[in-house]
Amino acid sequence: MAVYIRSAKINDLDEIMLIIDEAKQLLKSDGSPQWQDGTPNSDMFQEDIKKNRCYVLIVGKQIAGVAVLMTTRDPHYTNIEGGVWKDNRRQYATIHRIAISDRYRGQHLGEIFFSNLISHGVMLGIRNFRIDTHAMNKKMQHLIKKFGYHYRGIIYVNSTKDGARYAYELNL
């Protein structure tokens, strides 16, 4: 069965939002406040699709996951507490809003998705990757570290205490 990524299309939005809602429930059941404030939402994904930075993971002919690969500077990454970025000069890509459908959970597809997103970034000439996650999102932290990302400090996605995120960087 073929497993690959492709750019998301607007008609994928309903399936994307089902996957995001499943991920929100998983985070909630893990006790994490991440994604419990109404974001990410449909408007965000519509914008991501419009800007051609939203990707879906396809297994066979079904959408099994969603992620955003942002290749422009992320304003949340400007200030970092308790550390520094190793490479703050070259362009970087950021992986955001990655989620795998409940139907495919446990099949290590997150690893395949990460690998494909990084490969896509490398094909665009990017060798510096960043990602962040909540301190309570141990599953994502495990995946991030498995790919060789290094912890760099804390960034904030909003001004609340739940807006703090562990920030990681991968330099190839």
Image (spheres, rainbow, N blue to C red):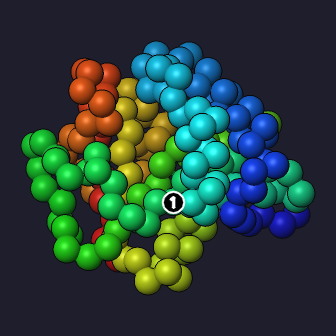
Residue ID at (56%, 65%)? 117
Which quadrant would residue 99 be assigned to in this image? top right
Q: Nearer the viewer, residue 17 or 65?
A: 17
Q: Nearer the viewer, residue 130 or 141?
A: 130
Which quadrant would residue 40 be assigned to in this image? top right
User: Which x, y percent locates residue 3?
Assistant: 77, 63
User: Which x, y percent locates residue 80?
Assistant: 16, 47
59 above or below 93? above
Residue ID at (61%, 21%)? 25
Q: Is residue 126 visible?
A: yes
State the quadrant of the C terminus.
bottom left
Residue ID at (30%, 30%)? 158
User: Which x, y percent locates residue 69?
Assistant: 51, 60
Q: Amino acid at mark 1?
A: Leu
Q: Nearer the viewer, residue 16 or 9?
A: 9
Residue ID at (56%, 74%)? 120
40 above or below 93? above
User: Which x, y percent locates residue 139?
Assistant: 48, 37
Q: Which residue is mark 1?
A: 69
Dot 1 falls on a residue whose secondary structure is strand
